[in-house]
Image: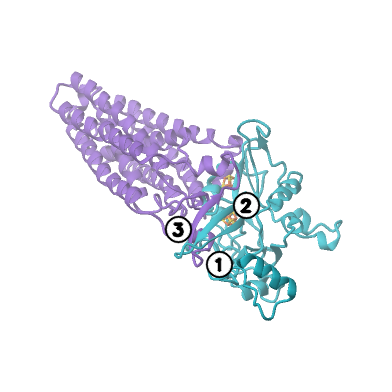
C-alpha cells in the first residue's frame, strides 16, 4: 500500500498525543502526578497540538477537505467515521480535565474523576478506531489481525510516555514522578517491540488465502500467470495499492526503526533515570526525537509492506 | 446510507462475462470510457493523455492471463474486470460519509460525487480494484452499470444495456437480472457453471464469469489426418504420393 505522508504523520502524531493525554490523566487520577500548572499547561497543550496537527494532516489528503464533517455521519458501519466521532468527542473531557488541572480545580472530586476517566478511555478508543480502519480491511492480509490494534495502542502508549519523560524533567517539583514515568515508557517500548515483532512475522512469513487462481477462477485449468497487463503505464490502482518495497530494503528499514525506536530511546531513558535533571532533560529529549524517527519509519513500513489483493490481477501469486 | 440494504434484494442487475468467448480486443473498455466520459460519473479524467506517462480513470480493464496445465499445455484467457456490484460490498460499509451506496431497487453500487470526500478508503476495501480515484475531481469513480443508459427511455429498447455489452463484437458479455433465477443470465450461469471471483473475500459479487470450455482436441495427439489412400480422391492420392516420397 502506498505510504502517504499525511497518513503517516497523522497516525504517529495523534497516537503520541492520545498516549500523552492518557498518561497525564491516569497519573493524575492515581495521585502520582502533582497538579502543577507547568505540567498541566505543557502536557495538555502538547497533546492538543500533536492530535490536532495529526487530524488536520489527515484531512489534507482528502479530495474534498471542506466536506470532512460528513465523515462523522456513518459511525454505524465505518471505522473511519467512528474514529472521527471518537476524535471529536475526546476533545471535550480531555480539554475539560486539562482546564481543571491548570486552573486549580480539586481534581479529586468525583466530577473531575469522571471527566478524567472518560477522557482517558476516549484516548484509548480513538487510537483503537484508527487501527481498526486498517485491521478491518480484508483485502490486506498484513493488517487484518488483532496485531494491528495491539501495535497501534502499544505504540501510542510508548510514544506518549516517552514525551512525558521529557516533560517531567522541566520542573524540579516533578522529580518524584520521574521514576514512574520512566518505567511506563520503558515498559511501553518493550511491549511495542514484542508486538511489532509478531507483525513482522505476519508480513514476511505468512500470506492471505487469495491467489492468482482464486482471483481469476481459472485454477481448475492450471497455473495462472499474467501474460499482459491491461495498461502500459501505472494507474491509480498500481500507485495506491500496488506499492511494493524490496525485501532487503524493508529489512534495512526495519533495523533502522528498531535502533531509532527501541534501542536508543530505551538506553537514553534508562540512563536519564540515574542522571541529574538537566542532563536527564537532554537525554530524554534525544530519546523522544529518536523515538519519533523510529515510529515514523515503522509506520512507513506498515503501509509499504502491506500487500493488497488487487495485485493478484497484476502478476502477484499470493496476497 | 452507508449500510447495505437489510434484506436480500429481489433485483440484482449485473454482467455475465464469458471467458470462453472474449478475444481481448478491449472494445468494451473503450466504449465504457466513451459513454461514461459523458455519463453519470463524468468526466473520467485523464492526466497527461498524450505525454510520456498517461494515466486516467477507467471503469473496465482487460487483463490477459496464461493458464498452464501440469502437462505444459497452456492457453491464453482474456479477462475483463469491472465492478462486480457485490451483495456484501465492503466498499459501501467502510465509507465514512455515506457517499458510497448500494441501491435497493436494482443492487447497483454507486458513488455520490456531491458527498464523497475523496478519502479513498472504499478503493482499499474493494478486493478487486474496481474503484479508481479521480485526482482532478477529488472523488472516487466506478462502474455505474450505465444507469444512464439501461433506463434511458429515449434509446431503442435493444440499446438499453451497458455500453460494454452493446459494443462487444464477440458477444462475450451479457447483462440482466441475476436475482431472478429464470432470467436468461441466471440460466446461462447455471448451465455453464458461472462462478464468483475471489470467493474467499466473501463479497458475494453479483457479476459472474463463465469458464473457458475444455478443449475439444488433445493438442499433442492429433496433427493433420493422413490421407487414406484407398478412399481418397484422385487429386488427394496424387498429392499424398508427391509428399510421401
Ligand atoms: S467489486 Fe469492489 S467496488 Fe464493486 S461492489 Fe464489489 S467491492 Fe464494491
Ligand atoms: S472516497 Fe468517497 S465514496 Fe469512497 S469511502 Fe471515501 S467518501 Fe466514501
Q: Residue sitting at 65 percent across and 54 percent down? A: B24
Q: Colour of chain A?
A: purple
Residue mark closest to the camera, 1 vs 3: 1
Q: Chain of mark 2?
A: B
Question: Cβ–Cβ below 8 Å for labels 2 and 3?
Answer: no
Whether disc 1's CB lies below 8 Å from ligand 1 is answered no
Q: Dividing the image into four quarters, tell me where ligand 1 lies.
A: bottom right
Q: Does dot 1 land on a helix, a strand or a loop?
A: loop
| Res. B150 in view | yes
- Snapshot quadrant of residue B204: bottom right
Instruction: Work out whether residue A237 or residue A276 is closer to the camera in this orientation and state it.
Output: A237
For label 3, the crowd category at 10 Å Cα-Cα, with few meaning under 14, some 14 to 19 and many 20 or more, is many
Whether disc 2's CB lies below 8 Å from ligand 1 is answered no
Question: Cβ–Cβ below 8 Å for labels 1 and 2?
Answer: no
**In 3D space, how far apart are the residues under numbered discs 1 and 3 (Cα atoms)?**
31 Å
Q: Is residue A185 above or below residue B36?
A: above
Q: Chain of mark 1?
A: B
Q: Colour of chain B?
A: cyan
Instruction: Work out whether residue A159 or residue A32 is closer to the camera in this orientation and state it.
Output: A159
Instruction: Work out whether residue A18 or residue A43 is closer to the camera in this orientation and state it.
Output: A18
**In 3D space, how far apart are the residues under numbered discs 1 and 2 (Cα atoms)?**
27 Å
Q: Is residue A159 above or below residue A132?
A: above
Question: Cβ–Cβ below 8 Å for labels 1 and 3?
Answer: no
Query: Can you tell which mark lies on residue B10?
Result: none
Query: Can you tell which mark lies on residue A210?
Result: 3
- Give the residue furthest to the left: A274
Mark 1 = which residue?
A: B219
Mark 2 = which residue?
A: B62
Amino acid at each position: 500500500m502506498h505510504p502517504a505522508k499525511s497518513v503517516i504523520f497523522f497516525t504517529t502524531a495523534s497516537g503520541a498525543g492520545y498516549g500523552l493525554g492518557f498518561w497525564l490523566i491516569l497519573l493524575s487520577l492515581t495521585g502520582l502526578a502533582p497538579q502543577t500548572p507547568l505540567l498541566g499547561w505543557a502536557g495538555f497543550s502538547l497533546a492538543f497540538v500533536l492530535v490536532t496537527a495529526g487530524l488536520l494532516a489527515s484531512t489534507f489528503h482528502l479530495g474534498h477537505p471542506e466536506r470532512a464533517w460528513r465523515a462523522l455521519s456513518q459511525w454505524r458501519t465505518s471505522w473511519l467515521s467512528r474514529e472521527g466521532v471518537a476524535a471529536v468527542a475526546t476533545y471535550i473531557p480531555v480539554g475539560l480535565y486539562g482546564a481543571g488541572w491548570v486552573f486549580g480545580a480539586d481534581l479529586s472530586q468525583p466530577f473531575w474523576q469522571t471527566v478524567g476517566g472518560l477522557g482517558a478511555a476516549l484516548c484509548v478508543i480513538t487510537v483503537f478506531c484508527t487501527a481498526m480502519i486498517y485491521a478491518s480491511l480484508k483485502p490486506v492480509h498484513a493488517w487484518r489481525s488483532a496485531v494491528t490494534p495491539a501495535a497501534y495502542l502499544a505504540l501510542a502508549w510508548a510514544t506518549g510516555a516517552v514525551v512525558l519523560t521529557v516533560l517531567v524533567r522541566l520542573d524540579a517539583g516533578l522529580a518524584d514522578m520521574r521514576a514512574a514515568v520512566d518505567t511506563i515508557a520503558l515498559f511501553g517500548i518493550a511491549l511495542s517491540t514484542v508486538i511489532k515483532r509478531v507483525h513482522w512475522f505476519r508480513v514476511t512469513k505468512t500470506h492471505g488465502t487469495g491467489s492468482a487462481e482464486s482471483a481469476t477462477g481459472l485454477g481448475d485449468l492450471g497455473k495462472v500467470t499474467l501474460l499482459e497487463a491491461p495498461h502500459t503505464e501505472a494507474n491509480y490502482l498500481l500507485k495506491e495499492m500496488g506499492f511494493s518495497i524490496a525485501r532487503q530494503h524493508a529489512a534495512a528499514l526495519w533495523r533502522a526503526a528498531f535502533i531509532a525506536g527501541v534501542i536508543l530511546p530505551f538506553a537514553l531513558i534508562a540512563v536519564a533515570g540515574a542522571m541529574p535533571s538537566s542532563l536527564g532533560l537532554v537525554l530524554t529529549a534525544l530519546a523522544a526525537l529518536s523515538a519519533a524517527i523510529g515510529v515514523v519509519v515503522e509506520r512507513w513500513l506498515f503501509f509499504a509492506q502491506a500487500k493488497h489483493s488487487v495485485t493478484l490481477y497484476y502478476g502477484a501469486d499470493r496476497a | 446510507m452507508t449500510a447495505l440494504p437489510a434484506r436480500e434484494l429481489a433485483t440484482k442487475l449485473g454482467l455475465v462475462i464469458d471467458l470462453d468467448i472474449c478475444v481481448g480486443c478491449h472494445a468494451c473498455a473503450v466504449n465504457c470510457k466513451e459513454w461514461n466520459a459523458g455519463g453519470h460519473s463524468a468526466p473520467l479524467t485523464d492526466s497527461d493523455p498524450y505525454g510520456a506517462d498517461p494515466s486516467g480513470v477507467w471503469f473496465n480493464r482487460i487483463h490477459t492471463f496464461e493458464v498452464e496445465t501440469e502437462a505444459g499445455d497452456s492457453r491464453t484467457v482474456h479477462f475483463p474486470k469491472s465492478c462486480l456490484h457485490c451483495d456484501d460490498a465492503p466498499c459501501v460499509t467502510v465509507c465514512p460519509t455515506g457517499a458510497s451506496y448500494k441501491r435497493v431497487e436494482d443492487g447497483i453500487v454507486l458513488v455520490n460525487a456531491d458527498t464523497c470526500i475523496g478519502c479513498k478508503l472504499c478503493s482499499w476495501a474493494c478486493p478487486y480494484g474496481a474503484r479508481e480515484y479521480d485526482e482532478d475531481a477529488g472523488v472516487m469513480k466506478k462502474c455505474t452499470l450505465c444507469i444512464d443508459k439501461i433506463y434511458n427511455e429515449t434509446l431503442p429498447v435493444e440499446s438499453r444495456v451497458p455500453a460494454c455489452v452493446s459494443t462487444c463484437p464477440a458477444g462475450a458479455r451479457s447483462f440482466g437480472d441475476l436475482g431472478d433465477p429464470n432470467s436468461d443470465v441466471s440460466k446461462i450461469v447455471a448451465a455453464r457453471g458461472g462462478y464468483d471471483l475471489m470467493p474467499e473475500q466473501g463479497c458475494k459479487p453479483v457479476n459472474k464469469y463463465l469458464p473457458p470450455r475444455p478443449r475439444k482436441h488433445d493438442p499433442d495427439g492429433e496433427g493433420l489426418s493422413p490421407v487414406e489412400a484407398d478412399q481418397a480422391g484422385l487429386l488427394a492420392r496424387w498429392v499424398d504420393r508427391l509428399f510421401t516420397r
